[in-house]
Amino acid sequence: MTDLPTDLTRATAADLADALASKTISSVEVTQAHLDRIAAVDGQVHSYLHVDTDGALAQARAVDERRQAGESLGALAGVPIAVKDVMTTKGVPTTCGSRILEGWIPPYDATVVTKLREAGLPILGKTNMDEFAMGSSTEHSAYGPSHNPWDLDRIPGGSGGGSSSVLASFQAPLATGTDTGGSIRQPAAVTATVGTKPTYGGVSRYGLVALASSLDQAGPCGRTVLDTALLHAVMGGHDPMDSTSIDAPVPPVVEAARAADVRGMRIGVVKELGGEGYQPGVRARFDESVALLEELGAEVVEVSCPNFGYALAAYYLILPSEASSNLAKFDAMRYGLRVLPEGVDAPSAEQVMAATRDAGFGDEVKRRIILGTYALSSGYYDAYYGSAQKVRALIAQDFDAAFGRVDVLVSPTAPTTAFKLGDKLEDPMAMYLNDIATIPANLAGVPGMSIPSGLADEDGLPAGIQILAPATKDERLYSVGAALEKALVDRWGGPILDRAPELGVAAAAKGA
């Protein structure tokens, strides 16, 4: 067993799991260490919207008691986790980063949360996010942005910037995320962490507050490929509560991560996901990673997916259309915020609804609801939403053709490193372009992963490489990701995240 660092928050989830299984440490010790870390640094990072101190420690004590009683426990039992605030948690606030759900306490758990509890993972709290998962920077959270631990003036990605920053600041060894157009992978890229979007239907969506139902996918986030695989194995599997859930076993992701072998694999570099608009340092780290894959025994070829160029436009018609439908349930009548219009003695239901949605939704949510409602309106449905779905089919065909030639596809995860807070907030199109490389996977339902590829020369900030696999072949992500991760650790002389500045020093330098 690997010796644990003195600071338990710096240990990998896999090493913590081994130490817990051998009773070298207790879950209460590990959980308390992370709660202490949260108290020390989250004031700077703002990763959490809610910290469940009592609940986490109670869950940790229960796991320790079961272990002492000799019960057979899961591989991650006792390892604490942070949960994105888009997943319902019984008895714990779920806001989706929105004022319209402020103070809502769900009466039930999402299936993913149920699986985490059953597997014995103490839930530390709920992580910050762009409101209803609409954004690429976490700046659209109604409760203020999260910050990138590499530079507190920069974004940690979005919509899952809370989950990525909680890992990069060592406030949790594991976190859950959701990915509608890149919201697991892009945050991972800009924080030097690991994130996987499983095959659509591979992880239950029951209890996830829906943004775009045909695109949303829950997935695991970690600091290493193996940690992420271990969490994937817990989260995945068929759920009869979700009609889109795949009725098949979870792919052998842990075995693939441990094997870490790419010998004999054919890897396709996507021609359309690179070049103009990609930061030189991001592209340089990507090219180095591809060269490492060749050295490890993979065959690398260029692959063209011509319809990927239309993915962004199609996505920003399909997503707002589905969002406008899904968010109609926030009507001030059943749950959540209720605002009465000013100056109206006996307001109608419609007036209350309008006042509530105006006060409860942020600008980005309103923008997408308006776009989606317009795209679905009579006379425009075929021209916009219908056409976008046809493009979606063409993108799926591009993937099918590519996977007929190669085992996996690779590209940079995001075109740039983390930009400064506020830089793109007033330019929605510039913000949307952050997802240009990740969106195709959601449109086709295929799995994708981002791992750190190194630090860009221009700014010393993390870049990521994206790996894409055919539907239900998630294990290929972990084979390639783990092999490349090991080679990159050797190249950089250790995990890339180890080069991040200590938060206390960064805060002092900024006069915090």
Image: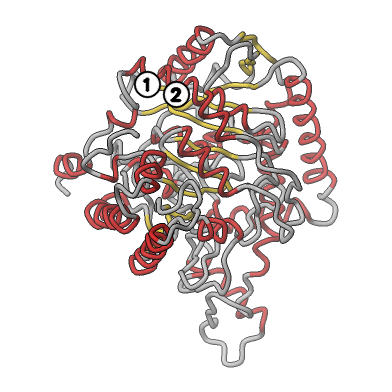
Please give the residue where the numbered disc 2 appears in the rendered image.
485
Establish if 424 lies above or below 395. Answer: below
Establish if 69 lies above or below 153. Answer: below
Residue at image point 80% right, 30% down: 394
Please give the residue where the numbered disc 1 appears in the rendered image.
489
Q: Nearer the viewer, residue 319 or 166?
A: 166
The answer to whether residue 356 is seen in the rendering is yes
* Position of residue 383 measured from the top left corner of the image (x, y, whole percent): 82, 43
Residue at image point 53% right, 59% down: 118
Q: What element carries label 2?
A: helix
Hey, what amino acid is under mark 1?
Val
Q: Are marks 1 and 2 in contact (CB under 8 Å)?
A: yes
* Position of residue 285 measured from the top left corner of the image (x, y, whole percent): 43, 17
Rendered image quadrant of residue 480: top right
Q: How crowded is mark 1: few (under 14 residues within 10 Å), some or many (20 or more)?
A: some
Hey, what amino acid is under mark 2?
Glu
Establish if 222 lies above or below 301. Answer: below
Rendered image quadrant of residue 409: top right
Q: Which of 125 and 353 is in front in this view?
A: 125
* Position of residue 224 measured from the top left corner of the image (x, y, whole percent): 43, 34
Quarter of the figure that contains the N terminus: top left
How far apart marks 1 and 2 lie (CA) works out to: 6 Å
